[in-house]
Image (cartoon, rainbow, N blue to C red):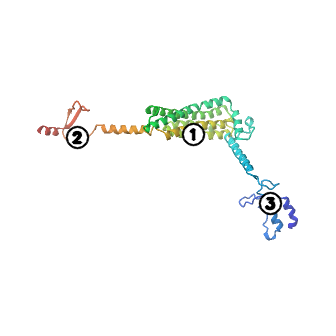
Amino acid sequence: MFTSSFPALRRAPIVFGRGISTSSSFSPLARVPFIPKSTIPRSTTALLRNQLIVRGAASSVSGRPGSQTVGHAAQNIREEVGQSAADLAKSIAGGNVFQDNVEPTQQTFLGITNAVAHAVPQPYVIFGLAGGLPYLGTAGATVYLARQAGIAAQGLVSNIDPGVAITILDQALNIQVTYGAVLLSFLGALHWGFEFAGYGGHKYYPRLLLGAAPVVFGWSTLALSPVNALIAQWIGFTGLWWADLRATGAGWTPKWYSQYRFYLSILVGTCIIGTLAATSYWGPVGGHGMISHDLNMIRAERKQHQPEREGTVAGDVEALPAPEDADKYVIVRKKEAEKSQEQH
C-alpha cells in the first residue's frame, strides 16, 4: 500500500513541509489518520525528514538559506528596515497613499512622505508652518530666560536682571499656554468646516463632537498653572492627531491631512517639551524656586514685626496717647498698673 502511494508523497512535498500546529483547527494534517511508526517504511520516514529539513531553507530549488554571507544578511536587514519605515509612513498618512494623486512612485519612507507632502497645497504648508512661529519664539525665550533666572538663583552673575528674567519668563509661559488653547480650538473647528461643506458626506453628531472636544479641552487648561497646562496641552495635541488619523482613514478629511497634522504636531510637541525641560532643569518659574523663597522670607519678616491687633485685656483699662516715637497712636493699659507706678 505504501509503495503505491510513495509517488504521491513525492508530488506533494508542501503538505509535509508545513509545521504541524495542535492549536489550529485548519491544520492540513488535521484529517490525516494516525499511522503507527512501525508500519511506515524507512524510505517514507527519510522522505518526511528531508521535507522538514527543506522547510528551513529560503530557496526550494537550491536548498540554501536566504543569508549565505554577512553581506547578504546586511542587505536583508536593510530591506526589512526599509519596509518597516515604509509601513510607518503609510500609517502616518492614514492609509490613503494608494488613492488618486497621493500614490507614491517609491515604496519607501521618503517616497511615501514626499508623495503625500507634494499633494498638500503650498498655501496650507506656508500658513501651517507660520502657525508654529509663536511656539518657536516662546520656547526659545523660555529656555534663555529660565537659564538666566537659574543662574541668578545660584548667586551667580547673569546677563539680565533676575526680576526682569522671571517676569518675562512668566509672561512667555502664559503666552504659550494661551496660544496652545487657541490652536487646539482652531484645529477642532476645522472638522466643523468639513462637516458644513459635507466633505466625505455629512457625519452629523460624531464629527461635530470631534470638533467641539478640543475647544472644551483647550479652554480648561487655562485654569491650570503654566507648567501643568503645557503638559495637558501636549496630551491634547497628541490625542487630537490620533483622532485626525482615524478621521483621515475614514475619509472625513483630505488624504494628506493626517500626515500634514503629524509633522505640525511634532513641531508643537518639540517646543512644549523644550519649554518644560528648560523650566524644570534651570527654573525658576512661578510657584517654585526663587519666587517662592523670596515670598516666604517676606511673609516671615512681616509676621515678626506685625503688632497685635486684637485681644482681651482684663480689668479696668484706659487709653493714653502714644509717644511721638511710637509706631502707634494709642496705648491701652490697666489703671492699676499706672497707680502702682505713681506710688513708687
Q: How crowded is mark 2: few (under 14 residues within 10 Å), some or many (20 or more)?
A: few
Q: Mark 2 points at which residue?
A: 313
On residue 236, the disc is 1
- Which residue lies under the disc numbered 3? 51
| Quadrant housing residue 190 | top right
Mark 1 burial class by Cα count in 10 Å: few <14, some 14-19, many 20+: many
Say left or right for 240 vs 344.
Answer: right
Circle nearer the viewer, 1 or 2: 1
Tell me the crowding category of disc 3: few under 14, some 14 to 19, or many 20 or more residues within 10 angstroms, Cα based: some
Q: In percent of the image, x 80 and y 63: which residue is there?
A: 48
* In the displayed structure image, the side of residue 225 where residue 316 appears, left or right: left
Which amino acid, by three-letter code, is at mark 1?
A: Gly
Q: Whole-percent x and y of residue 258?
A: 66, 38
Q: Do the residues labelled 1 and 2 touch (CB within 8 Å)?
A: no
Question: Which label's residue is closer to the chain start, 1 or 3?
Answer: 3
On the image, the x and y values in percent for residue 298 come to: 36, 37
Q: Which residue lies furthest to the top in this view?
A: 123
Mark toward the viewer: 1 or 3: 3
Q: Is mark 3 on a helix, strand or loop?
A: helix
Amino acid at dot 2: Val
Q: Which of 168 and 18 is in front in this view?
A: 168
